[in-house]
């Protein structure tokens, strides 16, 4: 699931939830919810959020939004010949965090003004992705049991199972034969 889809689904659920006060389902109420989700300790990034005392928030980068994006990634790459058992999907997690942040920010600030969301590109999100990689994702690498828990949770949300297989000779040969065609010549 893409970040925009995950955030939009939650917005729709909140708008339809009659257990919430009408003020919480109003435009202003939705803005407050989104602002709080983006706060330190907020639900955009935390599995167990706590914005009153952000230091009490737990499960960083394990929000339902990030887990849904990671589940989509893991489901589409499971058993890939390129996946190595000893490496974590650092880039994928950094991209997921950046995408979730951008999605919340777009729905909060730009979408109400009719501003289209820019493409998720290196120019629009490269710095943000690098920030997440160099901070929170790097912290998870220092605590592998937490990264493992995140991956187990995300994998449980997919409809595929990871099967440990060794790449066959044909897969390795195909991988060696593949070369991405350049769209332009390299800079001198």
Image (cartoon, grey):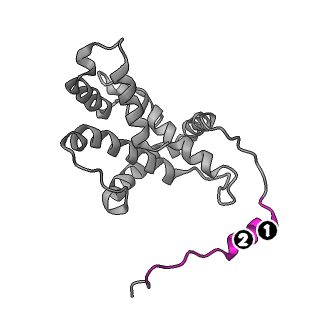
Rendering quarter of residue 119: bottom left
Residue ID at (58%, 40%): 151
Q: Which mark is residue 174?
A: 2
- Whether residue 94 appears in magenta in the rendering, the answer is no
- Tell me, yes or no, if residue 50 can be seen here: no
Crowd class of label 1 (few under 14; some 14 to 19; many from 20; radius 10 Å): few
- In the picture, measured across the screen, residue 23 lies left or right of residue 138, that is left
Q: Residue 110 or 142: which is nearer the viewer?
A: 110
Image quadrant in which you'd find residue 84: bottom right
Q: Which residues are magenta?
A: 167-184
Q: Residues within 10 Å of mark 2 (few under 14, many from 20)?
A: few
Q: Reply yes or no: does residue 169 show up in magenta.
A: yes
Does residue 63 sit above or below 70 in this rendering? above
Residue 126 disc label: none
- Judged from the image, the secondary structure of the residue bearing numbered disc 1 is helix
- Position of 51 relative to 152 (above/below): above
Residue 188 position within the rendered picture, expressed as x and y whole percent measured from the top left: 39, 88
Residue displayed at 71% across by 40% down: 161
Q: Nearer the viewer, residue 22 or 50?
A: 22
Residue 180 placement, left or right of 114: right
Q: State the SS at label 2.
A: helix
Q: Given contact means CB atoms under 8 Å apart, are the residues at marks 2 and 1 in contact?
A: yes
Residue found at the far bottom of this picture: 188
Residue 74, horizontal then vertical, whole percent: 59, 46
Please say whether residue 144 is visible from this viewpoint.
Answer: yes
Please name the residue that numbered disc 1 is placed on. Answer: 170
82 horizontally vs 185: left or right:
right
Q: Position of residue 165 (x, y in %)?
A: 78, 52
Between the residue at mark 2 and the residue at mark 1, the CA separation in whole angstroms equals: 6 Å
């Amino acid at each position: 699931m893409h970040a925009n889809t995950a955030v939009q689904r939650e917005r729709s659920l909140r708008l339809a939830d009659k257990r919430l006060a009408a003020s919480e389902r109003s435009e202003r109420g939705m803005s407050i919810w989104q602002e709080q989700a983006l706060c330190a300790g907020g639900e955009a990034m935390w599995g167990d959020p706590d914005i009153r005392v952000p230091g009490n928030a737990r499960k960083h980068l394990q929000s339902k939004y990030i887990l849904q994006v990671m589940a989509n990634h893991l489901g589409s790459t499971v058993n890939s010949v390129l996946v190595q058992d000893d490496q974590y999907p650092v880039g994928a997690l950094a991209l997921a965090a950046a995408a979730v942040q951008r999605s919340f920010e777009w729905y909060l600030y730009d979408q109400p003004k009719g501003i289209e969301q820019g493409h998720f590109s290196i120019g629009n999100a490269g710095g943000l992705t690098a920030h997440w990689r160099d901070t929170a994702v790097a912290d998870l690498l220092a605590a592998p049991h937490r990264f493992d828990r995140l991956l187990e949770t995300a994998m449980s949300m997919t409809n595929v199972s990871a099967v440990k297989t060794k790449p066959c000779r044909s897969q390795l040969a195909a991988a060696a034969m593949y070369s991405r065609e350049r769209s332009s010549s390299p800079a001198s």
